[in-house]
Image (cartoon, coloured by chain):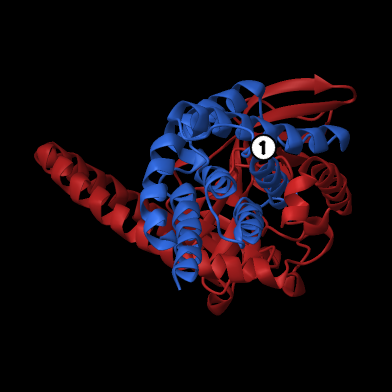
Chain colours: A red, B blue
Amino acid sequence: MKFLKNRAVLITIVLFFVSLQLFSLNIREKRSQNFISGIVLTLTYYPQKLVYIVSDKVLNTWQDYMDLVDVRQENIRLKKEVLSLRQDKFELAEQRVQNYRLKKLLDFKESPSYPIVSANVIGGSPSLLRTEVVIVDRGTRDGVSQGMPVASSEGIVGRVLTVGDRSSEVLLITDPVSAVDAFIHRTRVRGIVKGTGSGCTMEYIEQNSDVSIGDKVISSGKEGFFPKGVIIGTVSNLETKGSFISAQVSPFVDLDSLEEVVIILKTNNNIVLNE
Amino acid sequence: MNKYLSIIFLVLLSVIFITIQTTLLSPGNLGYFSPDLNLILIVFLAIFSEIRGGFFLALGNGYLMDVLSGNLPGTFMISRLSTYLLVRSGSNHVYLRKALVQGLVIFVATIFTWIFVLTIITIKKDSSFDITAKSILIQGIVNAVVGIPIFWMIQKVNARFQK
């Protein structure tokens, strides 16, 4: 240890070059997750879950108290909403029957459906360098494995980056290394949705394509990670870059306040190219 | 025996700090104003801890950061180990009993760690990381402010084990 202490500057320079080499190897991208990372995730799961349970209880108690203040007005509003939803439900049931009949007529091949597992977000990244990472309370014992897509009721969230026994790390779609093959719902124009840190952009859209602000963007299922047809967000701005159009996409899911997600148990083995 | 208790205490503290940093004080919630408790602990180990395992604790803490922030293994592990070594080697030449000096050391250590990481990112031309000089400076100040009372508390507890 005395040796290290006396030659700290020299060792720091050596460590700098070691770090540079490790960065070049780009270990995480080329190799599947290492065993120790899984252990670290499992070990930190218990204290993280404890903090999650305690903070959730405190927040819920506070929320329950606050909710009581406006409960009468909310009750009236909800009754109206129930009436409206009953009407919608009836119409949807009608449409479902019609849809089934038409699909049969067209001999339409159904997209495969995958089992899902719900998870709570129990933590986030501890570093400013990469904040688009969250930790969820499901791991290998729940059937989760690396690369599985993660969504919420509102749309795509990201994909599983590292898996522990009871918890996993999820890389959000807004992370700059994230990319999803997608298309515009209205016109079926294709592109790649990439993370920008604070949001997403859909790139490589051909210049003469029919895209406009407000269009919904959905996953194409072609890159193999995300199932086809899961909503990503809405086009909020358009920009021409060379011979392509770049569309700014506002994710449907509020990724800053994620609480619950679903992990789609879709491994690379059962990837189906939909089209 | 006391030496072992001290190590156990510091290992537990590492787990508690990283848990707080990934839950209640996550940069995802607080942005620039999130204190880096992990780095504060590494600076504490470098300045005050007399245990031999300080080097490995610093290494382990860096690894925890790497795994939990989804970064490449080594990015934080090596930068924090370098910070530990430099602060430890420099701690002989500076009077570190004053809170103000301790705060200054934490601030400089934060800036050094980020310069280390950002230099690598710049050399490798990796544009996937988005961090500004402003956020680094703010985190340096936050770390210094939060670090001083933490140092005082850890010293109080740790001194009991090291007696």
Image quarter of residue A237: top right
Task: Name the residue carrying label 1.
Answer: B90
For mark 1, does the 10 Å Cα neighbourhood hold few (<14), some (14 to 19), or many (20 or more) residues?
Answer: some
- Image mark count: 1
Point 66% across, 38% down: residue: A186
Compared to B121, does B153 lie above or below? below
The image shows residue B143 at horizontal and vertical percentages of: 50, 34
Query: Is A76 left, or right, of B15 in this rendering?
Result: left
Name the quarter where the C terminus of chain A is drawn. bottom right
Asked if residue B130 can be seen in this view, the reply is no
- Percent x, y of residue A210: 75, 29
Left/right of residue A208 with respect to residue A5 in the rendered view: right
User: Given the image, what chain letter belongs to the residue carrying mark 1?
Assistant: B
Q: Residue drawn 59% across and 38% down? A: A128
Q: Is residue A171 visible?
A: yes
**Quadrant assignment, res A67:** top left
Q: Is residue A95 above or below residue A105?
A: above
Observer-nearest of A108 and A44: A44
- Looking at the image, which residue is at 73% across and 66% down? A33
**Location of the N terminus of chain A (image quadrant):** bottom right
Residue A228 placement, left or right of A165: right
Q: Amino acid at mark 1?
A: Gly
| Residue A105 or residue A36, whichever sits in front | A36
